[in-house]
Image: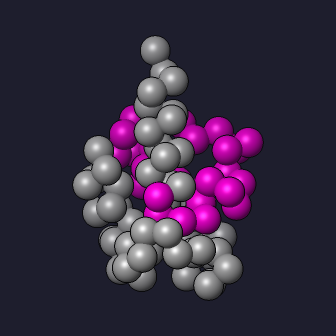
Amino acid sequence: MEKQIIEILSDISMELIEDMDRDLLASDILDSFDIVKLVVALEEAFDIVIDADLIVPENFQTANTIIALVKSIIDNRI
């Protein structure tokens, strides 16, 4: 799953995965349009729904937080 998320991130921009702990928002690597594209791609790839209340800066701050978000959604759906 992590590899697939990394592939999705790299499709949007290779900069997203250069440093998995880099603050993507503060460094202006990830903008609101990219977040929308990313949410759609992740929802389609993993057959999940990322609720609007989860689309907050803390969940999209780094590549690792994005991975954690997807894992959390998948782990909690039963």
Query: Looking at the image, which is closer to me, 21 or 33?
Result: 21
Residue drawn at 45 percent across, 27 percent down: 75
Residue 65, given in percent of the width and then of the height, sits at 53, 55
Q: Residue at x 33, y 61 (%)?
A: 6
Q: Is residue 36 above or below residue 51?
A: below
Q: Residue at x 70, y 61 (%)?
A: 57
Q: Is residue 13 visible?
A: no
**Relative vertical location of residue 33 with respect to residue 66 in this rendering, above or below:** below
Looking at the picture, how far across and down is residue 38, in whole percent?
49, 60
Q: Work out whether residue 18 or residue 46 is closer to the camera in this orientation and state it.
A: 18
Does 43 appear in magenta?
yes
> Which residue: 64% across, 75% down?
25
In the displayed structure, 16 sits above or below 51; it is below
The stretch in magenta equals 39-64
Left or right: residue 28 versus residue 72 is right
* Residue 48: x %, y % from top left: 46, 35
**Res 32 → quadrant:** bottom right
Residue 76 included in the magenta stretch of the image = no
Q: Quadrant of residue 61?
A: bottom right
The residue lying toward the viewer, choosing from 55 and 22, is: 22
Where residue 15 sits in the image (x, y, percent)?
A: 42, 82
Colour setting: one colour
Assign the magenta stretch its main secondary structure.
Answer: helix
Specify whether 15 is left or right of 73. left
In the picture, which quadrant includes the N terminus?
Answer: top left
Q: Residue 18 occupies which quadrant of the picture? A: bottom left
